[in-house]
């Protein structure tokens, strides 16, 4: 799951600003299987990418979060926070997209541990649009 929240800037004396604040982009990795995911440290991580609108590639990850063993239904979160201004061209008119990916060690399937082999690689990434983040700032 990839989600996003906003935190508006301002004080109690001012009205709530609906265009500026902090965007909290959060990836949630959850063990949806019926057995524990058992692994060694450093064999997998979650990477969060900012994908500028119109670019073919994302560049280096904005955040990398290591994770290890996960019991059934256990979650681990990876969060990247950044300033956001819906009225600026960078976020308002041409907002970047965000992608979260689970990245495994290249030899994880060869390590002799079947308890860390991912049985569904189709759910290892998710993308959210920057325009959806703008909608959240505007209360939509």
Image: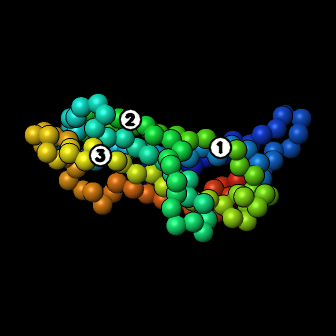
Quarter of the image where one finds residue 30:
top left
Q: Which quadrant would residue 110 be assigned to in this image?
A: top left
Dot 2 or dot 3: first in sequence order is 2
Taking depth in this image into account, of 119 and 96 the one nearest to the observer is 96
- Please name whichever residue, 22 or 109, is drawn nearer the observer in this view of the structure: 109
Image location (x, y in percent) of residue 135:
67, 60
How would you rate the neighbour count of disc 1 (Cα within 10 Å): few for under 14, some for 14-19, many for 20 or more? few
Residue wearing tag 2: 66
Frontmost of labels 3 and 1 is 3
Q: CA distance from mark 2 to mark 1?
A: 20 Å
Q: Is residue 47 visible?
A: yes
Q: Nearer the viewer, residue 49 or 33?
A: 49
Question: Where does residue 52 sit, x and y in percent of width and height?
Answer: 60, 60
In the shown orientation, is residue 61 left or right of residue 8?
left
Residue at the (31%, 40%) spot, across then down: 44
Q: Gap between marks 2 and 3, in whole Å? A: 10 Å
- Residue under the point 66% across and 61% down: 95
Spatial separation of the CA atoms under disc 3 and disc 1 = 26 Å
Q: Position of residue 51 (x, y in %)?
A: 55, 58
Element marked by disc 3: strand
Give the label on residue 82, or none. Answer: 1
Nearer-N-terminus badge (3/1): 1
Q: Secondary structure at mark 2?
A: strand
Q: Position of residue 62 (x, y in %)?
A: 54, 44
Q: Dot 3 corresponds to which residue?
A: 104
Q: Quadrant of the C terminus?
A: bottom right
Q: Name the residue at the left extreme.
A: 112
Asked if residue 2 can be seen in this view, the reply is: no
Other-residue count near label 3 (Cα within 10 Å), few / some / many at <14 / 14–19 / ≥20? some
């Amino acid at each position: 799951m990839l989600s996003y929240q906003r935190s508006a800037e301002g004080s109690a004396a001012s009205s709530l600003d609906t265009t500026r604040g902090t965007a909290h982009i959060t990836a949630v990795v959850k063990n949806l299987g019926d057995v524990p995911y058992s692994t060694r440290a450093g064999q997998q991580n979650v990477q969060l990418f900012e994908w500028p609108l119109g670019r073919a590639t994302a560049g280096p990850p904005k955040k990398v979060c290591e994770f290890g063993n996960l019991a059934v239904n256990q979650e681990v979160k990876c969060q990247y926070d950044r300033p956001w201004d819906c009225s600026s061209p960078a976020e308002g008119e041409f907002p970047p997209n965000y992608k979260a990916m689970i990245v495994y060690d290249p030899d994880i399937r060869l390590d002799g541990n079947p308890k860390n082999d991912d049985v569904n690689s189709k759910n290892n990434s998710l993308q959210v649009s920057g325009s959806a983040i703008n909608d959240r700032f505007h209360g939509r």
